[in-house]
Image (cartoon, grey):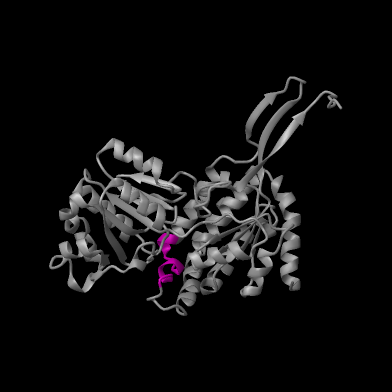
Amino acid sequence: MKKDIAKIFQEAAVTRRVLAEAPVSKINQALRLAARLFWQERQKILAINAKDLSKISPLAAFYDRAKLTEERIVAMAKQLQVVASLPSPLGRQQEKRKLPNGLELSRVSVPLGVVGVIYEARPNVTAEVFSLCLKSGNVCILKGGKEVAGTNTFLVRLIRQALQASSLPSASINLLPGGRDNVAALLQADGTVDVIIPRGGAGLIEYVRKNSIVPVIETGAGVVHTYFDKTGDVQAAAQIIFNAKTRRVSVCNALDTLLINRQRLADVFPLVAPLATRKVIVWADSATYQKLKGKYPAALLRHARPTDFGREFLDYQLSIKVAESLEEAINHINKFGSHHSDAIISKDKKSIQRFFQAVDSAVVYANASTAFSDGAEFGLGAEIGISTQKLHARGPLGLAALTSYKWIIRGQGQTRPV
């Protein structure tokens, strides 16, 4: 292991103990100062980000994720302030009881310790991870994408200024240099790093899962479905589908596949017609292709291939398939989805309840856009990512997901009988 990387891990191990006992007032002060610095230095941030972007093709799927605007910097600063305003997740008494022998048991929330996060492209993740880790008493070690290395480096520099001004260790946040060797070192840092959270595409997540000896919380790729049931409202559905697909195509909660009940196949064109204004390519199965032919722009209409189902597009593309029934739609989602976010559009309460019970996803919707799968939208302030696994945490990972617990036992001299 390179000396500078070893030093980062050593400092993180020391800092975790300091940060776990840091006053909430200092933590909140650091978050608010970081927000202020982001705003004050926004022109420098934009200039550095523009330099990073100049090395990326505007046609690249991750270009939008890598790009910062003044509005996005404002959003980053606001998220820091929101997290500062949230109650601390630490020291919460989750359970308390007294045993027959007089022992008093309580279960109390504590930090995880050192959290390693590997992510691609999006510099706003730097601010999100820092805010949540700091507020939950965790040290963070970040490995961002090389595409925005300059932006991430400058953001971390501003954050460390805020930490130092608040009398907190600057090693509360750490940014690893580029190179796959450093990723490997992070994944092998058992005993120093307590958990790894990958945030990115399926390839990154799979690589981390296979190569890490540190426990991993997976934030899965988003293969997102919306099912239009036989009682669905066309006008509402068209708006929901348009928002879910086009609000931001490069994020994990964007819609990938529309399933439509065969009894409503005649409504497929009004459902997707608004997408043509954003030049969304539609990959349609044979039945929907015939219904859209001559109506949806020919240049944007394609015959679906088997690989277009179960595919995370991250682009202005959508696949459509007919479902013979609610059960067939549920089975398709459970087979081809990624257990991220899936929706039903229906007026039938029994169908909605069946969908909620049977679809095995972290977030399940009825009559709403999947674009709401976001920690900030859920009132969590921000998110590390959206977990698609079932152990420890699921869905948007906020402050509570970055804590564990310890048992506190109070006695009066009790001993256990032999």
In this image, 273 relative to 124: left or right? left
Q: Position of residue 205 (x, y in %)?
A: 54, 63
**Of 9 and 370, the residue lying toward us:** 370
**Of 326 and 281, the residue lying toward us:** 326
Rendered image quadrant of residue 252: bottom left
Which image quadrant: the N terminus? bottom right
- Asked if residue 201 shows in the view, the reply is no
Which image quadrant: the C terminus? top right
Q: Relative to 288, say whether 82 is above or below.
A: above
Q: Position of residue 33 (x, y in %)?
A: 57, 54
Magenta stretch encompasses residue 159? no
In this image, 406 relative to 372: left or right? right
- Asked if residue 218 shows in the view, the reply is yes
Rendered image quadrant of residue 60: bottom left
In this image, 248 relative to 276: left or right? right
Q: Which residues are magenta?
A: 61-72
Residue at x 49% of width, y 55% of height = 77
Q: Relative to 14, say whether 207 is above or below.
A: below
Residue at x 26% of width, y 66% of height = 282
Q: How many marks?
A: 0
Q: Position of residue 47 (x, y in %)?
A: 48, 73
**Of 95 and 84, the residue lying toward us:** 95
Q: Position of residue 48 (x, y in %)?
A: 51, 73
In this image, 148 relative to 292: left or right? right
Rendered image quadrant of residue 105: top right
Residue at x 18% of width, y 72% of height = 298
